[in-house]
Amino acid sequence: MVTSVVLLVVGALAAVTAGWGIMLLALGFGSCDAPGNRCDEGLGAAVVTLGPVLVALVFLAAAVVCVLRLVRRRTAWPVALLGLGLVVVVFLVARLLVDGSVTIGI
């Protein structure tokens, strides 16, 4: 139980950090007006908008499943660890998508 709670707290901190990190990826679109640069602002805006929401949904789903498993006196730490891993994966995919949508020329 202690491990599950610790992993959920770490997951909550990671989810908040990942959500802010995804929103800060929007700063990469500041160079879109420079000559030679190309940006897919639609994709970037969608990722920056939906990324933090997806991070929150992944964390909330993991937390709900963990609480349900703890109430039933089952092992819950693997679910918390999986939720933490999925938060990291969502952040990395969002970063790849935003980096791919900004092409710096010259």
Image (cartoon, rainbow, N blue to C red):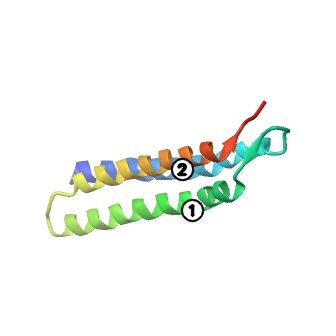
Relative placement, left or right, of 85 versus 94 is left
Q: Residue at x 39, y 50 (%)?
A: 11
Q: Position of residue 92 (x, y in %)?
A: 48, 44
Tell me the kind of residue under disc 1.
Leu
Looking at the image, which is closer to me, 48 or 97? 97
Q: Which mark is residue 27?
A: none
Q: Which residue is tagged 1?
A: 50
How many residues crowd around disc 1 within 10 Å: few (fewer than 14), some, or many (20 or more)?
some
- Report x, y in % for residue 46: 62, 61
Between the residue at mark 2 and the residue at mark 1, the CA separation in whole angstroms equals: 9 Å
Locate the C terminus and report the quarter of the image it occupies: top right
Q: Is mark 1 on a helix, strand or loop?
A: helix
Residue at x-position 23% and y-position 50%: 2
Instruction: Using the image, determine if residue 56 lies above or below residue 92.
Output: below
Residue picked out by circle 2: 94
- How far across and how far down the image is residue 37, in percent? 77, 40
Where disc 2 sits, the SS reads: helix
Quick one: quadrant of the N terminus? bottom left
Residue at the image point whose x is 32% and y is 49% from the top: 7
Disc 2 marks a residue whose amino acid type is Ala
Residue nearest the observer in this picture, 70 or 39: 39
Q: Position of residue 22 (x, y in %)?
A: 58, 50
Q: Count the marks: how many? A: 2
